[in-house]
Image: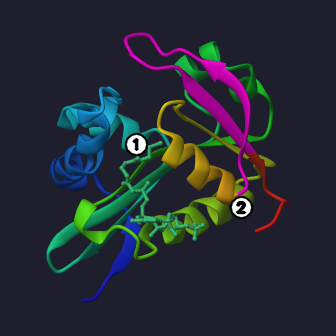
């Protein structure tokens, strides 16, 4: 089988939930209570179905995932002026199994998500991530994103940076 990427189906919710918990555990241990640290399967299904989701898997099971939404979710639009702007697709629930980090899985998912956003007519992709997670902010900067806004999600112990990237920009 090798490593393949395919669209998420509802039956993936249990395995995707377990993957998200494995991937986000390090953030949870740092006190960053991202939803994906401990979300239940119904939440995974709702979040994955709120847009287009891909999973990456091999014989051993799921090892990566990404959700892209356009337009961004209602709650986010209530918090972020950027998310309310026309032409915005949003990157969500990016995760790679800790044992598979640094092998290009996230970059591959991002390339897929970016192509999808262009196909559905987005002019920009946005995302939000925890300001204290500087390694993530730096990763997204390398991917061409720049911070435009800060928001506070209810119940989160951190402030989030809203970052945006135009789809015409390189790379
Ligand atoms: C963030 C995350 C998705 C990256 O996944 P990944 O598959 O390891 O990333 P890739 O191998 O595609 O590499 C992406 C970039 O990170 C760098 N990178 C990845 N792992 C690295 C490591 N161990 N050390 C240094 N750099 C690393 C790569 O060089 C690459 O940089 P580039 O895009 O400029 O070339 C993964 O670490 C993860 O699941 N983290 C926990 C969940 C999370 O933080 N999600 C995002 C919430 S906003």
Q: Is residue 162 above or below residue 134?
A: above
Q: Is residue 160 magenta?
A: yes
Q: Position of residue 121 (x, y in %)?
A: 77, 52
Q: Quadrant of residue 28?
A: top left
Q: Position of residue 120 (x, y in %)?
A: 70, 54
The residue at which mark 2 appears reads as: 119
Q: Mark 1 or mark 2, which is nearer the start of the sequence? A: 1
SS type, badge 2? helix
The residue at which mark 1 appears reads as: 49
Q: Position of residue 70 (x, y in %)?
A: 63, 41
Q: Is residue 57 above or below residue 3?
A: above
Q: Is residue 122 above or below residue 62?
A: above
Q: Quadrant of ligand 1?
A: bottom left
Count of labels in the image: 2
Q: Residue at x 61, y 29 (%)?
A: 161
Which residue is nearer to you in this view: 8 or 100? Answer: 100
Q: Residue at x 71, y 24 (%)?
A: 149
């Amino acid at each position: 089988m090798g490593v393949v990427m395919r669209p998420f189906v509802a039956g993936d919710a249990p395995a995707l939930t377990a993957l998200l918990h494995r991937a986000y555990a390090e953030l949870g241990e740092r006190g960053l209570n991202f939803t994906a640290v401990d979300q239940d399967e119904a939440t995974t299904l709702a979040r994955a179905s709120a847009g287009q989701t891909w999973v990456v898997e091999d014989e051993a099971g799921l090892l990566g995932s990404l959700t892209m939404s356009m337009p961004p979710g209602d709650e986010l639009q209530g918090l972020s002026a950027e998310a309310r702007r026309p032409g915005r697709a949003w990157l969500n629930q990016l995760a790679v199994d800790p044992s598979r980090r640094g092998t290009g899985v996230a970059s591959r998912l991002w390339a897929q998500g970016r192509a999808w956003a262009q196909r559905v007519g987005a002019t920009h992709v946005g995302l939000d991530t925890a300001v204290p997670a500087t390694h993530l902010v730096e990763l997204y900067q390398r991917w061409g994103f720049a911070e435009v806004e800060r928001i506070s999600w209810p119940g989160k112990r951190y402030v989030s940076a809203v970052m945006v990237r135009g789809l015409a920009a390189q790379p």
